[in-house]
């Protein structure tokens, strides 16, 4: 995950005990093919469960992160657009 972030990627981690299956499904639909939004097709995203998270959902990128209590399309999309490819070693 660190290496991915080093190259401008976004890491989405979630605590499976604190987040609903609906929120997980919405995250997958927003950030992975087939995309739920025709005008938003993100790349460079990795998502994985992380039971150690104190927050339900955490978005991480190089030197930045934001916590979410639940799925929030607008704020999550904004985080992605603001932070993707903001890292020391950009690659494709």
Image (cartoon, grey):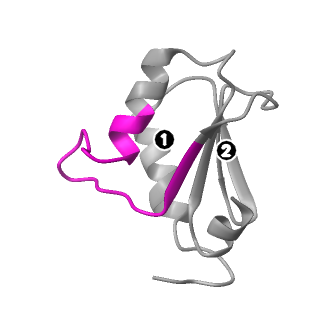
Dot 1 falls on a residue whose secondary structure is helix
Rendered image quadrant of residue 57 = top right
Q: Residue furthest left?
A: 38
Residue 66: give its label. Answer: 2
Circle 2 — which element? strand
Q: Name the residue rendered at 67%, 16% in the picture.
A: 18
Q: Quadrant of residue 13?
A: top right
Residue 79, image x and y in percent? 53, 52
Q: Residue 56: where, in percent of width, then height?
A: 67, 25
Which residue appears at 62% of the width and 24% of the height? Answer: 69
Looking at the image, tell me whether mark 1 or mark 2 is earlier in sequence order. Answer: 2
Report if residue 36 lies within the magenta region.
yes
Q: Would you say 74 lies left or right of 84 here?
A: left
- Magenta range: 27-47
Query: Does 80 sit above or below residue 14?
Result: below
Q: Marks 2 and 1: in contact by CB < 8 Å?
A: yes
Quarter that holds the N terminus: bottom right
Chief secondary structure of the magenta span? loop
* Residue 86: x %, y % from top left: 59, 73
Disc 1 to disc 2, C-alpha distance: 10 Å
Dot 1: within a 10 Å radius of its alpha carbon, few (fewer than 14), some, or many (20 or more) residues?
few
**Front-most of residues 69 and 3:** 3
């Amino acid at each position: 995950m660190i290496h991915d972030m080093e190259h401008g990627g976004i890491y989405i981690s979630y605590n499976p005990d604190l987040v609903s299956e609906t929120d997980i499904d919405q995250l997958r639909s927003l950030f992975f093919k087939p995309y739920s939004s025709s005008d938003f097709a993100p790349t460079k995203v990795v998502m994985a469960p992380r039971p150690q998270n104190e927050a339900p959902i955490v978005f991480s990128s190089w030197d930045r992160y934001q916590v979410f209590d639940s799925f929030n399309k607008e704020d999550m999309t904004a985080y992605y657009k603001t932070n993707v490819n903001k890292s020391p070693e950009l690659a494709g």
